[in-house]
Image (tube, rainbow, N blue to C red):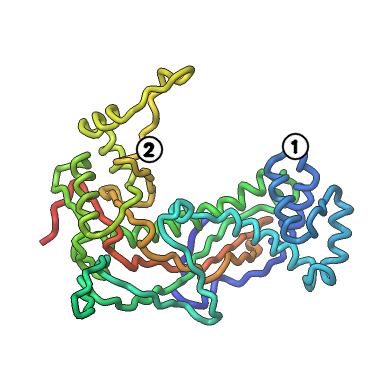
Amino acid sequence: MRLENYGTSSPSPTAGSQEKVTEMGRKLLEKSVEQRESSKTAEKFASRFEEKFLEEGQKLKTTEDINQLEKTAQEDLQFGNNSALYTTAITDFIEREFEPTLVGMDVIKRISLTEQGKDSIKVPKQPDLQVASDVASDGTLTDDSADYTVTTIQTDFIGLVTPMTIELLRNANVDLMEDQLRQIVNALERKVDADVTTEMENAATKNDGTYGSNNNFNYLGSGTNASYDGVVEAYYDMRANNADPDMFICSPEFGGNLFTEADMKDAVAFGTVSAGGNDANVVPAVQSILGFPVMIADQMSANYGLWVDTDRLGYLVDKTGIETMDQQLDGKAAFEVKAIKGFGVEITKPQAVYSVIEDTDEPA
C-alpha cells in the first residue's frame, strides 16, 4: 500500500480501468445481501446501497433481487451499464466512510470547490482578529486591525494504491473485503489530518515563511517540557489576541509530558468529581483543560500543542469526491485498487491558533 501526491490539477496515475472495482462492488453486494442477518458490516453496506440506488422501502433479500436490479439499472436508475452501478457503490462507500478526525471534530471548516476546471479558490485573510470600536460624535468609525487581504487556497490530489488478490475478491467474506477498502479510507484520512496539522503549526510558528509572525506562540525553552502553566498562559495570551479558543490539540508526546507534570496532575485531581455506585473507585479519564476538550493528533510534531478557535481558523477545500480505478498486476493473480481525492487547506486567520512549543528556544 502506498500513498501518492499529484501536484497538479490533472493527476495522471498509472493507467487503470474499473473492471475489478466493478467486480468487487458486485461481489461485496452479493455477500452483503447473503450475510446481512449475521454481520453488521454486511447490513451496513447493503443498507447504504439500497439508500442510494433503490426506492424508499425497497430491500434486497436474494441474489435474484440483484439480478433484477441489473436489468433495470439502465432505464430506472439512469446508469448506462452495471459497471457504473457497482463502481459508484464502491466509491460511495469510501466517500461516506471518509471523515478525517480533525474535520469530524469541527476543528476546521469544510467547503467545496464546485467550479469545473478550477484548482484553487480565493478566500479573505486577516492577520488580526477584529473588535468593534466606539462611534465618534461625528459618526466616524475606526478600525483597530489590518484590512482584509485575499489568499488563494491551492488544491492538489492525493492517491492511494493498495493491492488485492483475486482470491480475496472471489472468496473472502464481506468483513475482509470491507477491511481492505477501509485501508484506503484510513490512509486518505490520515493524509488530510496531517496537512491540517501542518498548516496550523506553520501559522503559529515565529517567522514562518508563509504566515509570518502573528504574536501567537509560546516557546517554553530548550530543556523545558510541556507544563500546566505554559498551556494556561497560552490560553489567556490567545484571548488577549481577541480569539476564542475552544479546543486544545497536541501530539502524543506533548500530551504525555503535560498530563504527567506535577501541576497538571494536581489540577486534574482538584477538578475530579468522585463517582458514585459501581464507579466509585474509578478515576475519570483526562479529557479537558480549563473545561475545553483535548484532542491527541498523531500527525502533529512531537513538541507542539495548539489552542484553536475552531470558528475562525480556516478552511479545508474539497476539490473532488473520491475517484476509484484499478489495474491488473503483471505476472500476479492480483490487482491494485486506486483511490484519488483532490483537496487543499489553509489557515485564513492565523491568530485563531496559538502554539505551545516545548523543549525549543524562541527564534530571534
Q: Residue furthest left?
A: 364
Along the line of sight, the residue nearer the viewer: 252 or 59: 59
**Helix, strand or loop for disc 1:** loop
Residue 271 at what x, y percent from top left?
A: 30, 30
In the image, residue 31 sits, relative to residue 142, either above or below, namely: above
Taking the image as shown, residue 284 lies to the left or right of residue 144, namely right
Q: Which residue is mark 2?
A: 287
In primary-sequence order, the first of circles 2 and 1 is 1
Residues at marks 2 and 1, CA–CA distance in whole angstroms: 36 Å
Is 78 situated left or right of 205 in this image?
right
- Residue 156 lies, in percent from the top left, at 46, 71
Give above or below for 274 relative to 176.
above
Q: Which residue is mark 1?
A: 38
Q: Are marks 2 and 1 in contact (CB under 8 Å)?
A: no
Amino acid identity at mark 2: Gln
Q: Which mark is residue 110?
A: none
Instruction: Confirm whether residue 145 shows in the render.
Output: no
What residue is drawn where x is 24% and y is 29%?
266
Give me the residue at 32% from left, 72% from top: 125
